[in-house]
């Protein structure tokens, strides 16, 4: 059975040793590898630095002729790189020619005044330079004064909202964000609930201070005095009506004192949030700054703390009132 033998060096007397270059640029012959797809083939050559070649680094390759292309059939194509005798392709990047332009059409630009007046002759686009959303709506008013909705917007320039209009039937325009009405309803509900709570708090404070007046015929427990009776035998009998334990327990008293402080602290924190928003307004680039919430992180934490303090104050107040009622009973 024949055996394989490998030689690393051979010395022949009188034959000078070959000294290959170890630096400089190199380029292989055309066809060192090829790129193929459905019967089409594009020969390539490798170029680079000899030091990179000796180090085993990646080398660049390209078509042999400037501008040479690999024809591709219509539809899907499987592109493969064939290995050469020395080199093989590891990463392949294709550059396709840009498709022929469909041509441009002249469009009219509608100038809109701050009052909403549209200056347009003929057909054109009414564009709202806000981030695109199907919730945006636009209306046009014609010469008769009647207003009609333009429907859902179309995406313009990748981000804006646009509606196709005609200058003859659109003398003025206005925009509105449809889902905003639900937010407005929520604001009104929140305001009414806040006012109702404020009224309830005011009534409670007024009653606790005796603003409601004393009930006719009723006698305060603390105003009752002891009744002293003297018998014929000289025995004194003092009858003192039960005061009903008017003083709360120490814990109840502490809770009743702590609750107003907690409510006051929460109210001050809410006021501080509003002041911080006014003093440190968020930088808005024409209303398209979506990082405004990051600019007010401190205010968000203060609002959260105010809510937690308010909840704690409510719990403390409820517990104190229940303990006071049980002590009075």
Image (spheres, rainbow, N blue to C red):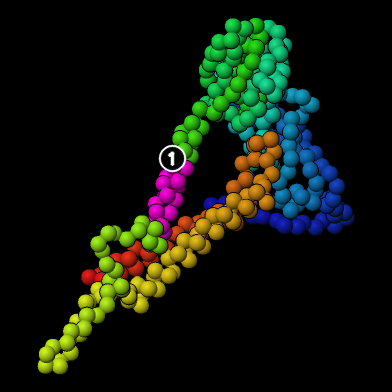
User: Which residue is tagged 1?
Assistant: 189
Query: Where is 9 relative to 96, above or below?
Result: below
Could you tell me which quadrant the C terminus lies in?
bottom left
Please say whether residue 253 is visible from this viewpoint: yes
Q: In the depicted view, which residue is nearer to us: 1 or 81? A: 81
- Taking 90 as reference, is 21 left or right? right
Q: Is mark 1 on a helix, strand or loop?
A: helix
Give neighbour class at mark 1: few <14, some 14-19, many 20+ (Cα, 10 Å). Answer: few
Horizontal side, residue 82 vs residue 314: left or right: right
Query: Which SS does the magenta portion mostly show?
Result: helix
The residue lying at 46 percent from left, 61 percent from top is 263
Residue 120 in the image: x percent, y percent?
Answer: 70, 11
Q: Which of 252 and 59 is in front in this view?
A: 252
- Residue 219 position in % (x across, y down): 27, 67
Which quadrant holds residue 222?
bottom left
- Residue 231, by quadrant, is bottom left
* Residue 38 image offset from top left, x and y in percent: 58, 23
Q: What stretch is highlighted in magenta?
A: 191-206
Q: Which of 128 and 215 is in front in this view?
A: 215
Asked whether residue 73 appears in the rendered view, the answer is no
Residue 315 covered by magenta stretch: no
């Amino acid at each position: 059975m024949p055996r394989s033998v490998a030689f690393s060096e051979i010395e022949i007397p009188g034959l000078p040793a070959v000294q290959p270059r170890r630096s400089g640029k190199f380029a292989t012959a055309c066809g060192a590898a090829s790129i193929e797809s459905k019967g089409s083939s594009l020969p390539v050559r490798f170029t680079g630095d000899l030091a990179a070649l000796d180090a085993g680094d990646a080398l660049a390759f390209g078509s042999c002729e400037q501008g040479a292309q690999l024809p591709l059939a219509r539809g899907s194509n499987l592109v493969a790189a064939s290995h050469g005798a020395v080199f093989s392709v590891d990463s392949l990047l294709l550059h396709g020619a840009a498709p022929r332009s469909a041509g441009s059409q002249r469009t009219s630009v509608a100038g809109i005044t701050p009052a909403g007046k549209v200056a347009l002759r003929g057909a054109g686009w009414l564009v709202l330079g806000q981030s695109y959303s199907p919730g945006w709506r636009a209306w046009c008013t014609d010469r008769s004064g009647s207003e009609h909705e333009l429907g859902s917007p179309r995406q313009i320039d990748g981000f804006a909202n646009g509606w196709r209009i005609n200058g003859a039937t659109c003398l003025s325009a206005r925009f509105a964000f449809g889902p905003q009405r639900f937010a407005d309803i929520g604001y009104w509900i929140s305001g009414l609930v806040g006012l109702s709570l404020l009224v309830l708090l005011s009534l409670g404070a007024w009653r606790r201070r005796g603003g409601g007046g004393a009930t006719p015929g009723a006698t305060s427990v603390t105003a009752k005095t002891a009744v002293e009776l003297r018998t014929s035998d000289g025995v004194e009998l003092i009858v003192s009506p039960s005061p009903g334990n008017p003083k709360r327990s120490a814990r109840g008293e502490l809770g009743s004192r702590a609750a107003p402080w907690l409510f006051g602290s929460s109210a001050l924190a809410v006021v501080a949030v509003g002041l911080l928003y006014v003093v440190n307004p968020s930088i808005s680039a024409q209303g398209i700054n979506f990082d405004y919430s990051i600019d007010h992180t401190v205010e968000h934490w203060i609002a959260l703390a105010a809510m937690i303090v308010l909840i704690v104050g409510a719990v403390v107040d409820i517990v104190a009132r229940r303990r006071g009622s049980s002590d009075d009973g």
